[in-house]
Amino acid sequence: MINMQQGRIVKIISNQYTIQNETEEIIAKPRGKMRQQEAPVVGDFVEYEKIEDAYRIHKILPRTNRLLRPAIANVDQALIVTSLKDPDYSCHLLNRLIFLVSLAHVKPVICVTKQDLLEDSQAILADLGKYKKAGYEVVFSNPGSDDVELKQILKGKVSVLCGQSGAGKSSLLNRLNPDFELQTQAISKALGRGKHTTRYCQLHEVCDGLVADTPGFSSLDFTRLDTSHLDECILDFKPYIHSCRFSDCKHLNEPDCKIKEAVKQGLINETIYEDYKNIMEQRGKF
């Protein structure tokens, strides 16, 4: 009789899958026939069994969502770690990360770091206020802060940290739980960006939740994604999206587009619309 068990993958190194169930962590490998199928990723719930002294994964259970990069599944929210200095703040990178996680049906949370390194942050704070006004959650974390708000956001959730290399993702996890002793590196002054300090994706227990620390990245490719419903994922657009003259309006060149009117009136973050338009026009070329 097969004694099948279930658990969540919390770490993958090469072909070694660390699975956590209610009582323990075990290391398993996929069965041979799974190698012709889609590979499991961190966050996947799987069925597995013990065969003699080894564990074998039989199948991946249905997912609620899946991010391509970082490769992780069944995520509640993505903390978009956004530094204000070293590397400098970029609203366009922030916008594209918001789009990317929203397209994967993951809630974006903007986590701002390194405000202490900036002498005058008023203009950037005003810009971040536009995201908060649209309905995005914005939280700040700096060395020495108690991070009460951030800890509450993480509690009971599966979260992924994403953002530009050097934005402070590993440092943030170290502050929340000093036991991690995760490797951090200083920003490379020559390149103006950080080196990848995280070598693989892993879920850590943080603030009564699970948080993934993943390799950083600074360029995003939307050409392989279905962006046909991107407009429905953007909180800035929600009050106006069903008011356009045409039900299939893409908010680019169509007449009587309420979203374009709202942009002109200053009711929608202009850079959000600019990045939306660039992505949609780029998609039209493929």
Image (cartoon, grey):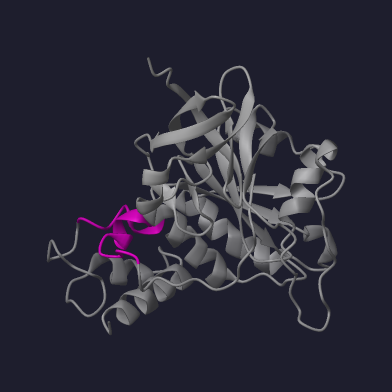
Viewer-proximal residue, 4 or 106? 4
Query: Residue 129's x, y, as percent?
Result: 58, 57
Which residue is outermost to the front? 52
Please, is residue 14 above or below residue 185 in the view? above
Residue occupying image coordinates x 83% and y 59%: 116
- Quadrant of the image for the C terminus? bottom left
Which residue is outermost to the top? 1
Query: Residue 269's x, y, as percent?
Result: 46, 66
Q: Any magenta on residue 121?
A: no
Q: Residue 202 vs residue 263: left or right? A: right
Residue 194, picture quadrant: bottom right
Which residue is outermost to the left? 246
Residue 265, picture quadrant: bottom left
Range covered by the magenta-colored residues: 225-242
Viewer-proximal residue, 273 or 41? 41
- Count of numbered tags: 0
Residue occupying image coordinates x 82% and y 54%: 183
Residue occupying image coordinates x 82% and y 75%: 188
Residue occupying image coordinates x 75% and y 61%: 197
Please, is residue 191 above or below residue 127 in the view? below
Query: Residue 274's x, y, as percent?
Result: 42, 76
